[in-house]
Image: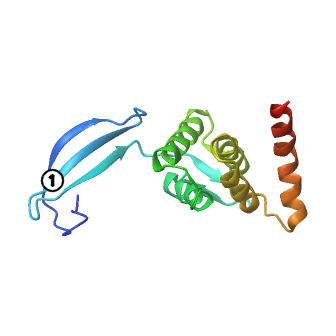
Amino acid sequence: MNCPFCHEDNDRVVDSRASEDGQAIRRRRECLACKRRYTTYERVEQTVKVVKKDGVRVPFDRTRLKQGLEKACWKRPVSDAQLEQIVTTVENLVESKADAEVESRYLGELVMHHLRQLDQVAYVRFASVYRQFEDVHDFVDELRPMLAEADEAEL
């Protein structure tokens, strides 16, 4: 493992433990050259493929999923831990499926379900990209059920 600070390939493991979700091993490392510490995660290599709308198959990438969530939650009161929880939940659901392939539509719906509960503005941002909104009417159509639910909750 190369140190992210000085790029030396000489470190020692200070601490190892299972991560919160139990799907990875968290290792605290110390670079023997610069003495700085950093964290690495060890995960099972995934073989799940995502089938895109155009039929292209790509490996499932939790980093790409998290980046999409970060864009949707930009300047919103959503913590990194909350985003990580969504990514982990979606990843676990994908891996628990018996299939070696999962459709991108299924992933998008899972993410939108979790985002809607977490932050409605982030949900609409994500939906606008995922569902390729063309104009303001698409936004209104997406917001209409949310507004109806809010009105019912007030009663």
109 vs 84, nearest the viewer? 84
Residue 78 spot, x, y in % from top left: 54, 50
Q: Quadrant of residue 146?
A: top right
- Residue at disc 1, secondary structure: strand
Amino acid type, label 1: Glu
Q: In the picture, which quadrant includes the N terminus? A: bottom left
Residue drawn at the location 80% of the way across and 32% of the way down:
153
Q: Residue at x 48, y 46 (%)?
A: 84
Looking at this view, is 11 or 121 the one in front? 121
Q: In this view, does 98 lie to the left or right of 145?
A: left
Report x, y in % for residue 35: 11, 59
Q: Position of residue 127 (x, y in %)?
A: 74, 55
**Is 112 on the left-hand or right-hand side of 39?**
right
Residue with the mark numbered 1: 30
Q: State whether residue 44 is above or below residue 6.
A: above
- Can residue 53 be seen in the rendering of this structure? no
